[in-house]
């Protein structure tokens, strides 16, 4: 009797701790693979690590090198050009398409599917087509010349000054449908009663959108900006598939810069320093957003 | 069947105390209703009896045995939840049978117990249906059936009728009472509706801000409230509270129920008042007045009695002893 | 998507409205063409002969349809120095994606369940800390991950990639399931506790059967992400263990010999086919994943 009682108590105690027993190893995994790894990378960024990691701290040497490397400035400038155009155009296209799609269209489901499919495919896949379309000898340039305009040139893909804009073109193509979907969901969540009240007050379609619907979607706009910014900073496939960072390193971005220094040039310290800069940028955008989202969810 | 005792029960969430020491002794087969406004801790108290919340301090005993550290299923209780909490992917039969299956009850017995409960609750035609295919009242019955089949020692009800419309609520109230009588099972029932409490309870517990202000039979609590809070919470329309300084007399506050007040000619009045408005309800009429001191006072009179015009000055009278006096802390004097 | 609410604000009758409506459909139709034309270029080019590609325009419909390029892309195209086509790499991706999807979904479901329905002290903080893992730029973990895989003897292997995708997928899946489980009434879990069910009993018998939509969304989302991954594949595998995305990139960028554009395009379609199929069949769930996880980006 006493024995079974003890065992029951033991198994009850185990049962009660089960949630923690389940979560703990998963949390430990995340601590190790996320926070532990970040710590390691940060540490390495303060060392003279080259091909092999060394663990003796050497201060800000790598960061000083990073910030005197022209290629890093190219990467930052490209990131700035790319993300401002990418975010701006994707949002403009997204909101316009969302409003157009919001007009009781019977084939809405089909159209939405078409607008959004680029998000479901790897850009390594669709980039194959884009590379071909943008290639001067094969794509648009050749097409227009064959139409009878022999002087037409569209060589952005191989022009160091313009290659970054081809990445914008492809990036917008890939993500504007996503922006559209987010905006459409936002439009649909506007309170129906408010719209009826506006209709009774005699507000026309244009007024209803500009004065009521869009202002009430301010949080959606913020979300879309943050989501797109996050995509922009992380974009790696896009560059690799389209230009490989070239011509030269004209279309390098921080993501490809880090990869090149880590795996092609084996300068671990520099690679780590650039990765830490990326992390800092993402944190500056995401952490305040997440914080407010989580707090909002609790309320 | 069993007794239930709460002995100095306390509960804190983190550092915030929400239950400040409650003692209740429930006799075998008794129907106890815990009533109070939202946030008074009544549901928390019930969930501590169920074993869904830990007990910070004090003791919960079922049939004399301390159950503080027992899991819900080892406490010999069954519970009916506010939103029914039916398993949406299971049929009515499986909803009722789930607890028995876990307890490894033999199949024929499960079948027999579920059928009996279903018959008792008029659910026989619905056993194969999913909860979403049932009406609100039927879902309520399934939730009760799930509790009944376990043959528990104690029934726990957490505001089970609050999601039903008014008419169905009255009907289900009667059914719950009959069922409990028929099965003779001890019941602990939580509600914020004082009418439900009055009609169901053998004894009721009026909770206020984590304390049990008063425990007693409904009519006794109505007739003899121990605190200002109880006097105000039990009875509808609520007790009028008057600053006694305006009338002379002791105590910090004086309460008088609308049904104990009568309109009378001014010379015979204990106090004069101006009529603000009258609400004729048919069988009775509510007359809202204002005293010179500014206090609002409602009078309840027979529906056949004449109704004074708004703005008229009337006298109010009551039988000596009908007034209730309270000290500054709200205790009855 | 959700119920039609703002729909039809611009919806009047009369000839002017007909014109507006015509314009609306024209614009929407043009954008359909815009989104579809790269896919069309890939499909059309993949069934053309090299001669036809050189002569005609990339927008032209194919004259003679031939699947030779497809056969070559699947079985004989050269990836680096090896000329067995995409087939072995496609199988690598399958071997990688299936276990990684199953593992990350199962663990995420358990984790989300324990964090929402068995709220213990610190659950919120644990969740917030784990959620952060979904947002980090993976560049910041590439170097230590490469070393760790080496230490574990998993460098350059498919199991290594399974580990990577499971670990970094966990934050997403936990978020998905947590968001879903928050909507499951606590009363149901408590009723099951009173009925005598334990932690796993409630999970498998009550919560999971109620969560089929969340499971479908998560599986589809995870599959798409893992199949399409390029960064981890290119960083942690070499040659024979490459996933199909990396192999495709190698095919396309091979500069030796005659450039066979039709084979490149066929290879691209083959590599994208699984996620494209999943999207066509269960696109609604994918969209729900996109918006349910809007917080995740």
Image (tube, coloured by chain):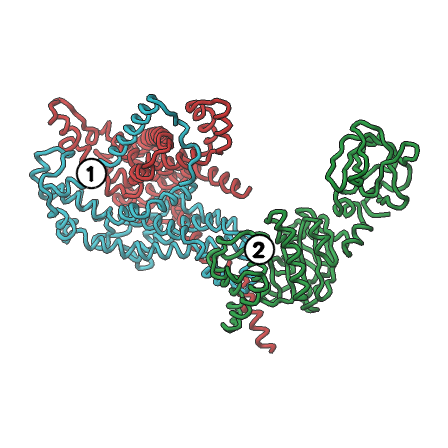
Chain colours: A red, B green, C cyan
Binning the other alpha carbons within 10 Å of mark 1 as few (below 14), some (14 to 19) or many (20 upward) gives some
Residue at the (34%, 53%) spot, across then down: C164
Q: Residue A177's x, y, as percent?
A: 33, 36
Q: Secondary structure at mark 2?
A: helix
Residue at the (61%, 61%) spot, across then down: B51
Going by the image, does A68 lie left or right of C3? left
Residue positioned most to the right: B267
Residue at the (26%, 49%) spot, across then down: C274
Quadrant where the image shows the N terminus of chain C: top left
Quadrant where the image shows the C terminus of chain C: top left
The quadrant holding residue A135 is top left
Going by the image, does B184 lie left or right of C262? right
- Would residue B171 be seen by someone viewing this image from the given angle? yes
Q: Secondary structure at mark 1?
A: helix
Q: Nearer the viewer, residue C173 or C209?
A: C209
Q: Residue B9's x, y, as percent?
A: 70, 58
- Would residue A80 be seen by someone viewing this image from the given angle? no
- The residue at which mark 1 appears reads as C40
Going by the image, does C256 lie left or right of C103? left
B221 over C265 or under it: above or below: below
To which chain does the residue with label 2 belong?
B
Nearer the observer, disc 2 or disc 1? 2
A204 over A288 or under it: above or below: above
Q: Nearer the viewer, residue C59 or B262?
A: B262
Q: Residue A295's x, y, as percent?
A: 53, 41
Q: Which mark is residue B140?
A: 2
């Amino acid at each position: 009797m006493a024995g079974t009682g003890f065992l029951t108590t033991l198994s009850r105690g185990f049962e009660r701790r089960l949630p923690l027993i389940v979560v703990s190893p998963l949390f430990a995994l995340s601590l190790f693979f996320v926070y532990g790894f970040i710590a390691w990378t940060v540490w390495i960024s303060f060392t003279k690590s080259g091909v092999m990691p060394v663990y003796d701290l050497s201060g800000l040497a790598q960061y000083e090198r990073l910030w005197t490397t022209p290629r890093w400035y190219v990467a930052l400038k490209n990131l700035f050009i790319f993300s401002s155009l990418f975010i701006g155009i994707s949002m403009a296209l997204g909101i316009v398409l969302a409003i157009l799609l919001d007009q009781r269209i019977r084939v809405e489901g089909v159209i939405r599917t078409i607008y959004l499919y680029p998000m479901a495919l790897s850009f390594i896949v669709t980039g194959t087509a884009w590379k071909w379309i943008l290639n001067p000898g094969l794509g648009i340039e050749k097409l227009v010349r064959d139409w009878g305009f022999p002087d037409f040139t569209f060589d952005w893909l191989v022009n160091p000054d313009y290659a970054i804009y081809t990445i914008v073109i492809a990036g917008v193509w890939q993500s504007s449908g996503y922006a559209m979907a987010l905006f459409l969901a936002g439009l649909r969540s506007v309170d129906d009663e408010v719209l009826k009240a506006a209709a009774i007050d005699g507000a026309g379609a244009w007024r209803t959108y500009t004065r009521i619907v869009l202002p009430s979607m301010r949080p959606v706009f913020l979300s879309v900006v943050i989501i797109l910014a996050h995509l922009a900073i992380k974009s790696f496939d896009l560059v690799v598939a389209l230009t490989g960072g070239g011509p030269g390193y004209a279309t390098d971005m921080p993501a490809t810069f880090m990869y090149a220094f880590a795996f092609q040039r084996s300068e671990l310290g520099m690679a780590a320093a650039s990765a830490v800069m990326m992390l800092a940028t993402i944190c500056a955008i995401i952490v305040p957003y997440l914080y407010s989202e989580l707090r909002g969810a609790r309320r | 069947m069993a007794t239930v005792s709460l002995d100095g029960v306390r509960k804190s969430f983190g550092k915030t105390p929400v239950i400040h020491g409650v003692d209740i002794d429930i006799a075998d087969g008794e129907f106890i209703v815990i009533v109070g406004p939202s946030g008074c801790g009544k549901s928390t108290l019930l969930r501590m009896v169920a074993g869904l919340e830990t007990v910070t301090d004090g003791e919960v005993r079922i049939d004399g045995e301390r159950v503080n550290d027992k899991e819900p299923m080892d406490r010999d209780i069954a519970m009916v939840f506010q939103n029914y909490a039916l398993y949406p992917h299971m049929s009515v039969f499986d909803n009722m049978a789930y607890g028995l299956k876990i307890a490894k009850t033999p199949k024929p017995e499960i079948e027999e117990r579920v059928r009996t409960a279903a018959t008792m609750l008029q659910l026989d035609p619905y056993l194969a249906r999913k909860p979403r295919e049932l009406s609100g009242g039927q879902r309520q019955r399934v939730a009760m059936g799930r509790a009944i089949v376990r043959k528990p020692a104690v029934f726990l009800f957490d505001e089970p009728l609050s999601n039903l419309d008014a008419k169905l609520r009255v009907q289900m109230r009667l059914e719950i009472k009959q069922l409990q009588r028929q099965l003779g099972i001890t019941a602990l029932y939580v509600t914020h509706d004082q009418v439900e409490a009055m009609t169901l309870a053998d004894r009721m517990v009026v909770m206020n801000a984590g304390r049990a202000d008063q425990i007693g039979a409904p009519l006794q609590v109505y007739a003899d409230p121990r605190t200002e809070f109880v006097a105000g919470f039990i009875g509808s329309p609520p007790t009028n509270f008057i600053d006694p300084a305006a009338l002379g007399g002791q105590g910090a506050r004086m309460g008088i129920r609308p049904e104990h007040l009568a309109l009378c000619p001014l010379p015979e009045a204990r106090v004069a008042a101006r009529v603000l408005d009258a609400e004729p309800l048919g069988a009775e009429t509510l007359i809202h007045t204002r005293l010179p001191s500014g206090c609002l006072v409602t009078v309840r009179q027979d529906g056949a009695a004449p109704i004074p015009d708004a703005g008229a000055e009337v006298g109010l009278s009551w039988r000596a002893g009908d007034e209730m006096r309270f000290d500054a802390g709200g205790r009855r004097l | 998507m959700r119920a039609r609410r703002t729909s039809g604000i611009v919806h009047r009758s009369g000839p002017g409205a007909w014109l507006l409506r015509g314009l609306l459909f024209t614009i929407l139709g043009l954008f359909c063409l815009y989104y579809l034309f790269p896919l069309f270029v890939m499909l059309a080019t993949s069934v053309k002969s090299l001669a036809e590609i050189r002569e005609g325009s990339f927008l032209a419909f194919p004259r003679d349809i031939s699947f030779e390029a497809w056969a070559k892309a699947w079985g004989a195209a050269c990836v680096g120095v090896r000329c067995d086509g995409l087939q072995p790499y496609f199988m690598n991706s399958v071997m990688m994606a299936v276990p990684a999807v199953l593992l990350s979904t199962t663990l995420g479901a358990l984790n989300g369940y324990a964090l929402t329905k068995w709220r213990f002290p610190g659950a919120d903080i644990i969740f917030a800390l784990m959620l952060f893992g979904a947002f980090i730029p993976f560049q910041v973990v590439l170097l230590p991950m490469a070393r760790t895989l080496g230490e574990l003897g998993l460098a350059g292997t498919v199991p290594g990639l399974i580990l990577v995708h499971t670990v970094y997928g966990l934050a997403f899946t936990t978020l998905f399931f947590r968001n879903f489980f928050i909507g499951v009434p606590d009363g149901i879990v408590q009723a099951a506790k009173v009925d005598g069910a334990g932690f796993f009993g409630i999970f498998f018998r009550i919560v999971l059967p109620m969560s089929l939509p969340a499971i479908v969304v998560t599986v589809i989302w995870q599959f798409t992400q893992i199949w399409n991954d390029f960064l981890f594949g290119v960083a942690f595998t070499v040659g024979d263990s490459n996933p199909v995305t990396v192999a495709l990139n190698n095919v396309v960028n091979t500069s030796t010999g005659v450039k066979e554009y039709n084979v490149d395009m066929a290879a691209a379609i083959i590599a994208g086919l699984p996620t494209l199929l999943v999207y066509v069949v269960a696109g609604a769930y994918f969209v729900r994943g996109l918006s349910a996880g809007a917080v995740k980006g």
